[in-house]
Amino acid sequence: MTPDPARSDPTGADLAGLALAVLAVAPEAAGGIWLRAQAGPDRDRWLAALRASAVPGVPFRRMPAGIAESRLIGGLDLAATLASGLPVTERGLLAEADGGYLVISMAERLDPWLASLVAATAETGELHVERDGVTQTLPAQFAMVALDEGIDDEAPPSLLTERLGLVLDLAHAPFGESPFSFQAMTAARERLPVVATSARIIGELCAAAAGFGLASLRPSLQAVAVARALAALHGRLDVEDEDAILAAALVLAPRAVQWPSRQEQQEEETPPPPPPDADTPPPENPPQEQSGDPPDDVMSQSALAALPAGLLADLKARAASGRQRSAGKAGAREKNARRGRAVGVKPGDPRTGARLGLIDTLRAAAPWQKLRRGASFGDGTIAVRREDFRIVRRRARRRTTTLFIVDASGSSALQRLGEAKGAVQLLLAECYVRRDEVALITFRGRVAEMVLPPTRALARAARALAGLAGGGGTPLATAIDTARQVAEGIMRSGRTPVLVFMTDARANIGRDGQPGRERAMADARQAARELAALGQTTILIDTANKPGEAAAILADAMEARYLPLPYAAPELVVHAVSQERPAPRAAHRA
Amino acid sequence: MSAEAYGAQRPLPDREEPLRETLAGHPAPVDRANRMLRVTPAPAPRQRVPFPFSAIVAQEEMKNALILSAIDATIGGVLIFGDRGTGKSTAIRALAALLPRMRAIVGCPYGCEPGRPAASCEHCQRLSLDKGRRGQAESHLVPVPVVDLPLGATEDRVVGALDLERALARGEKAFQPGLLAKAHRGFLYIDEVNLLEDHLVDVLLDVAASGENVVEREGLSIRHPARFVLVGSGNPEEGELRPQLLDRFGLSVDVETPSDLETRIEVVRRRDAFDRDPEAFADAWRGRDAGIRRRISAARKRIGSMTTSEGALRRATELCIALGTDGLRGELTLIRAARALAAYQGEDSVEEEHVRIVAPMALRHRLRRSPLDDSRATARVERAIGEVFGS
């Protein structure tokens, strides 16, 4: 009941234990937890402790990443329907989790479409079912436990993560044992409804959220709710600073896209305190627009102090390399396709390998039952004949992501960038109905960077493309390597990448970042061969004023289509891409 | 979001015995006595108190757009696009709670309006012919339907389909109306509208244009009125909306997370107060919500007798010409929205100022898209307003 004094010292805070206690005491306040951890005994122990801490008997439902939509939200229970001869509904997993916890396995691989179904249900706390002739509204209030085993920038869809108040990385915040006894948690649950939050604390948490560059209001709301739960756990009726600081460490800091400056009067543009690994460049993301001066950000500083050192370094490095998992990457990932979703049914023979549309078959058979069954009608058996069979039409079309890799080096950089920009926007305008995506990598100096992560949002692309810089060396090998990695990511998410290189192929920076043409060209060819191993459609547009052999050889090595276009007008580029792209509306039966 | 929902020990549904519930027999009454299969009904959803409309901080344009489309259904609904967590769906659910009730014919599955046989379903048309000499059909006050089109809805539930239960149990060919029928005379709300399946978008486009749902499937041939106010919300990061669907929305609003710290704090404070005690919070705002409800009712009565000033008409036309909006729909919506605003403000005539206020929401989604023009639609509309109104 009495908190361990060591634990009330924020610098020694046991974040894993606190997160667990908050989730056990106030699941609906936290919304859920984004639990980054590899599968293993540590994670299992944490989950077991959560289960032991929760109200006894509440449901824990595990949701596998590949769960069928019909199982998730429910609908007609076919087995029971066929057995009884009357429609019987089945409750979806989301409704089964009501009052308890939904444990989402491999959340980083979760299909974005399923994620949006979960998110929509979490939003209202109710599951609206309008499927297969079933109309139901079922209570579905649950806390989510999203297990994220992602490496690097893999992350669950952001529309899910933004509903998960708590963020915990078990690698950096190891879990010892539950810091509160079961009785203390029961008492906290009873206390929670009367715990009050002062206007000052709310103000400071909002200010801290602004300090971390969190544009959305949701983290502030979640932080306030978590602070209340922490106060209840500590036996208080009012939220105190310490609760708010820990709440900020659990909710706000892990989502930071910028770092509150230590000196109060520093300019907003000031780079963050250098992360431990010194050579990381300053963050690419400009600070979010905020109004006014950030207030004295004591809260966020204290929250930072409460984070384990390793985690802090990790977060900063990630933010610095532009790989933070906020709106950017995850947002891009969640657009990728509901692959092969059923789009309707038609009469047909299921023996051709097509999937039988059971409900529609049933519906087709239904009107004839009286006629077919005659006297035995109503005994619960359904007579289905061949002409009743309905098969599912699927749209298994592969959505493509067109990846531009644009040479921004040297003197013609600006022109090429302009052309690429035009091509990107034209492609987006043309293909948004198809929900294809476009991404852009530029390379110059020593680095290749993802300027525009895969997106189909025109507005976002326009923003990202404004004011690209050019000039410098040509690190072609690095660019090809980066393109290959990105293409692999695109393939993992079930899309087809189409790679479009726009370069004169005159590499002069090698893979190791050192200048030298010979070496650079050899590296580039090697990288090209590795890329070719992926077997994806690739186009190399030679942008040299006098198209030369260098580019042709490279195109050969990467098994790309070679296209000399000294003046790559956007329309020409788009035309070339359209020719290579798989047929857009290839619907087929599956 | 009460703590008790989690704290209390509620009996768990027995996993061995799957929860069974037969489908709702609709529209004709079903004889429930002679059923072999009887069922435990699903637990009734805990009644959640919606967040009060009047307690929504800032977002004035969104609130206005919702109120205007509640006053005049012919405006054509609202599309709310913006960041996540800006209270888009909160506002729409809050609006549903404060709509004045409407009068509907008793027993009509579509909630037809009494006294308007031309706009009624076949059932009510017959009814009004039968009763023609003896006065109107019986009617009662019902809440205005605000129907959610949930993600994952299947087409059969949207347009309606053969009622499986009655077909299987009794060999009857009966129509089970879908969401479009339910939404008749009310609102159809689509959250994440840009994630809506293409084939459902097609259905919506068709029905929204004709005001009638025609079902030709499974041997059924049914048509029924389906006039509803389309309300959509979404996050532009998820992708664009098809232009045809965009055009169906009368008004469109871009919401942004307030960046001003004071406003943000106020949002969080009210939400915190609401989460702690929804009933008490709703009580505190009930008066103000009732005020808005009264004003909507009054505006609806007034709107039939409004006049529109020559100046307002002229400005509306000039604006649409300046912006090059396609077709007459923009102009018509602009005038209707201005009229609803004037009515809401208790005035008798539509003036230029009303047009000016509603112009951004009525026009910003109707501009020709140019992939190479980065400037935002709102800025373009405002520029045109500046030119036309000479500010």
Image: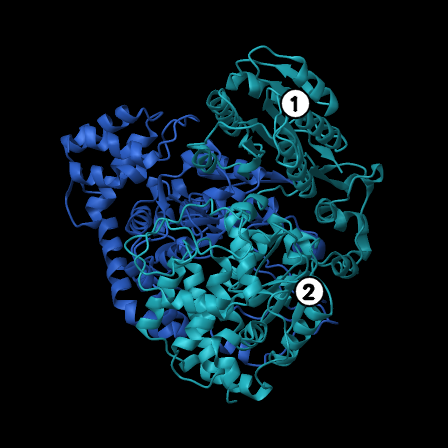
Chain colours: A cyan, B blue
**Residue at 70% across / 38% down in the picture?**
A394
| Chain ID, mark 1 | A
Front-lying residue, A221 or B142: A221
Q: Earlier in the sequence, mark 2 or mark 1?
A: 2
Q: Tell me the kind of residue under disc 1.
A: Ile
**SS for tag 1?**
strand
Q: Tell me the kind of residue under disc 2.
A: Arg
Mark in the foreground, 2 or 1: 1
Residue A167 marker: none
Q: Position of residue B183 (x, y in %)?
A: 46, 49
Disc 2 designates what residue?
A62
**Residue at 27% across / 38% down in the picture?**
B336
Q: Position of residue A412 (x, y in %)?
A: 49, 20
Question: Does B379 sit left or right of A46 as displayed?
Answer: left
**Quadrant where the C terminus of chain B is found in the figure:** top left
> Residue lying furthest right in this view?
A351
Front-lying residue, A511 or B62: A511
**Residue at 33% across / 46% down in the picture?**
B69
Question: Does B80 sit left or right of B35 as displayed?
Answer: left
Task: Give neighbour class at mark 2: few <14, some 14-19, many 20+ (Cα, 10 Å).
Answer: some
**SS for tag 2?**
strand
Task: Give neighbour class at mark 1: few <14, some 14-19, many 20+ (Cα, 10 Å).
Answer: many
Identify the image quadrant of residue A552. Answer: top right
Q: Is residue A217 above or below residue A452?
A: below
Front-lying residue, A108 or B300: A108
Question: Does A248 sit left or right of B98 as displayed?
Answer: right
| Chain ID, mark 2 | A
Disc 1 designates what residue?
A539
User: Is residue B96 visible from the viewing direction of this image?
Assistant: no
Identify the image quadrant of residue A545. Answer: top right
Q: Is residue A11 above or below residue A330?
A: below
Q: Is residue A522 above or below residue A313?
A: above
